[in-house]
Image (cartoon, rainbow, N blue to C red):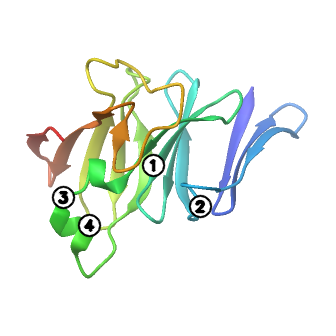
Amino acid sequence: MRLLVVHETQLAIYDASKMDRIRQWVPQDALSAPISYAAYSCNSQLVYATFYDGNIGVFDADSLRLRCRIAPSAYLSQAALNGSQSVHPLVVAANPLDPNQFAVGLTDGSVKVIEPTESEGKWGSSPPMDNGILNGRTASSSTTSNHTPDQTQR
């Protein structure tokens, strides 16, 4: 059994039976903002972490190696990106059946469902390029606000 510990300054995985730290990751490089939230995927193979600057990191749960960075431009509208108030994820929730799909709750009250593109099928094994491009393709994002589905491909 493993325990994911989240703080603004770090992600850490502990052996729950001994409370020994197994792995630790601190914000760095493209993901240098404080961490707002993190959660395991439903199969405990991935860790989804959100950051106060709007970035989202998808990590391998065993090594805490970054598999994918999702830039805010991949799931936020231009209006939200350029607005007077900063919009960023406050919480992340893993889909209970699909380990590659998760939702983020944003500071503006909206919820975004995020998954890899259909051609990828799962999150990459290497860090992505900037501007929301994942291995040469943009991430898929479904938007839900006030329980009204509004499918948007980006």
Where residue 128 sits, quadrant-wise, is: top left
Above or below 50: residue 52 = below
Q: Cβ–Cβ below 8 Å for labels 4 and 3?
A: yes
Residue at screen point 74% across, 31% down: 2
Q: Is residue 34 left or right of residue 115?
A: right
Q: Is residue 67 left or right of residue 109?
A: right
- Residue that mark 1 sits on: 56
For marks 1 and 2, give the CA distance: 11 Å
For the residue marked with disc 4, what is the amino acid? Answer: Leu
Question: The C terminus lies in which quarter of the figure?
Answer: top left
Where residue 129 sits, quadrant-wise, is: top left
Q: Earlier in the sequence, mark 3 or mark 2?
A: 2
For the residue marked with disc 2, what is the amino acid? Answer: Ser
For marks 1 and 4, give the CA distance: 15 Å
For marks 1 and 3, give the CA distance: 16 Å
- Residue that mark 3 sits on: 77
Residue at screen point 25% across, 20% down: 118
Describe the element under mark 1 as helix, strand or loop: strand
Seen from this angle, which residue lies furthest bottom?
A: 84
Residue at screen point 53% across, 21% down: 43
For marks 4 and 3, give the CA distance: 6 Å
